Amino acid sequence: MKRLFILALLLLPTGLWAQSAAVKKIMEMAREDNRTMQHLDILCNRFGGRPVGSDAYDNAADWAVKQFQSWGLEVSVEKVGETCVGFNRGGWWGRAMGEYTETLYFTTPSYTSGTKGPQRGHVVIEPRTWDEFNRMKGTLKGAWVLLKSKSTGWPLDHDAKAKERRHAAIKENEEIAKQNREAGVDGKKRPLNEMPALFYDEMVEAGVLGFIQPTTVPIRTLYDRNMINDGTTTFEQLPTVPDIKLDEAQFERIYKLAEQRRYVELEFDIRNYFKMGPVPYHNVVATMKGSKYPDEYVILGAHLDAYDSATGGVDCGSGVSAVMEAARMLSVSGAKPERSIIFILFAGEEFGLLGSLKWIEDHPEKLDKISNVFNRDGGPMPYTAFYAPASLVKEYEKIAKPIQELYPSYNFTINKLEPRSVPTSLGGNDATSFMVKGIPAVQMAEWSDPMGYNFDYHEIWHTERDTYQKSIPEYQEQAATALAIMALGTANLPTILPRNEVYK
Ligand SMILES: [Zn+2]
């Protein structure tokens, strides 16, 4: 019996043996030592929200480099770009007092100003014509200004172009106001242009404390894209007053009181800080070199940057933590993939897929040799299927076996992929940067919530709710394991994914 076993060992091709031993080890780690949530804890709760240009982004990138290195991977830090100035967020709170007393629920977009400590002041409603402005200009100093139009998540524009647009809108309002006056008391009235903060510069000059816009809840706040895209903003041109997006129900109550000229004061303390630029930001790229085809690649990607009104627990902590754990599992397992596996933590996805586009631009020689890009950026869900190119369905059925064995309740299946057209425009994640180039970026299905955790992507998507607790540990752990197993299986296939079976 024993002799037979040894004979069988000798007959087994060494590559296959090594792989099955590695997969076994991965399965053991999946059961007993899955560290996906540990990575996520550090990412979210030690570093926090991580827009590019922030210290938190750089801290997270430094940490990821050290982690990949400690697992024996080759790591390169590749510059993607730089922001003209940097931004770091601290805490914030606010309250209303007077005839309405409540803790206020709000956030501010990234790259906008904080307060000068706790600042308390009365409330005014913004003027829309010069008449309205002149009537109330004496009340602006020390006031919080209510802007009627609802927030879109973007900050108020404050550059020279915005000033031109505003002055054109004020002119239009002067005309409308004149017509409305001429129409008489009972005549038909035209509504005024409600572009927010028409007198932005005049109000800042008059000494307002800041601007407040209503927003739906959860609160979505983004970043100053004019500043980032234009790239010429200097430290001297930064906004100087806060740009607050307040729960619309609370806004409504305060607005009513202000209209009725009743007593209400607001107090805000917002710790938004800038730093001198330019601030460079980088992709973190870790490589596990292929033993047989080192110049062919399987890529595992996720974006390291995240909005900072929360901590990027899901977007894209769910991707980063799973990709990092897959890297650790593969390294510790002793896997010797035949093709190289590259783990990329992309920079600046939220500012326009910047990291993935730059990686593609910087590595033209690799593009034809990429088998598949697995990019995780769709929430904390488990993987439940993979649609494989027709000629590889049989191979993937074998590859997927350990995933099915480990997580039977998720019912992971392999199906046949119907070739699709190469997309012509970029979409909402880094995978699409590869797809538009005709590079396979076939993702595992991650849309179902088999255990019923009532997850709602819209709730966390760029909102103040996107924290560590919104992640789902058992799903995240499955995702990391599935990524490790699928990456290794794909790296050991007889061929790279045939592109004519992925795309029409
Ligand atoms: Zn994302």
Image (cartoon, rainbow, N blue to C red):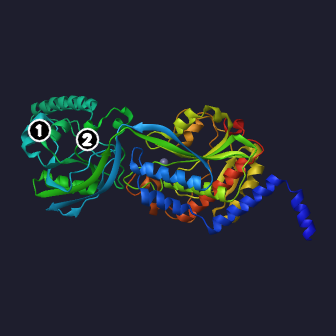
Instruction: Using the numbered discs, state the Cα–Cα distance from disc 2 to disc 1 in whole angstroms.
Output: 21 Å
Q: Position of residue 437 (x, y in %)?
A: 60, 33
Q: Residue at x 36, y 32 (%)?
A: 230
Position of the C terminus by quadrant? top right
Query: Is ligand 1 within 8 Å of the beta carbon of the residue shown at mark 2?
Result: no
Q: Do we see residue 442 in this rendering?
A: no
Q: Position of residue 2 (x, y in %)?
A: 90, 70
Mark 2: amino acid = Pro
Q: Secondary structure at mark 1?
A: helix
Q: Position of residue 346 (x, y in %)?
A: 52, 44
Query: Is ligand 1 within 8 Å of the beta carbon of the residue shown at mark 1?
Result: no
Q: What label does residue 244 carry, if any?
A: none
- Horizontally, is 328 left or right of 358 in the view? right
Task: Depth check: give the residue in front, 322 or 406.
Answer: 322
Position of the N terminus by quadrant? bottom right
Q: What label does residue 239 carry, if any?
A: 2
Residue under label 1, please give it: 133
Mark 1: amino acid = Phe
- Horizontally, is 297 left or right of 126 in the view? right
Task: Depth check: give the residue in front, 98 or 483.
Answer: 483
Q: Residue at x 24, y 28 (%)?
A: 164
- Horizontally, is 287 left or right of 127 in the view? right
Q: Residue at x 64, y 35 (%)?
A: 366
Task: Depth check: give the residue in front, 220 or 308.
Answer: 308
**Vertical placement of 448 versus 130: above or below?**
below
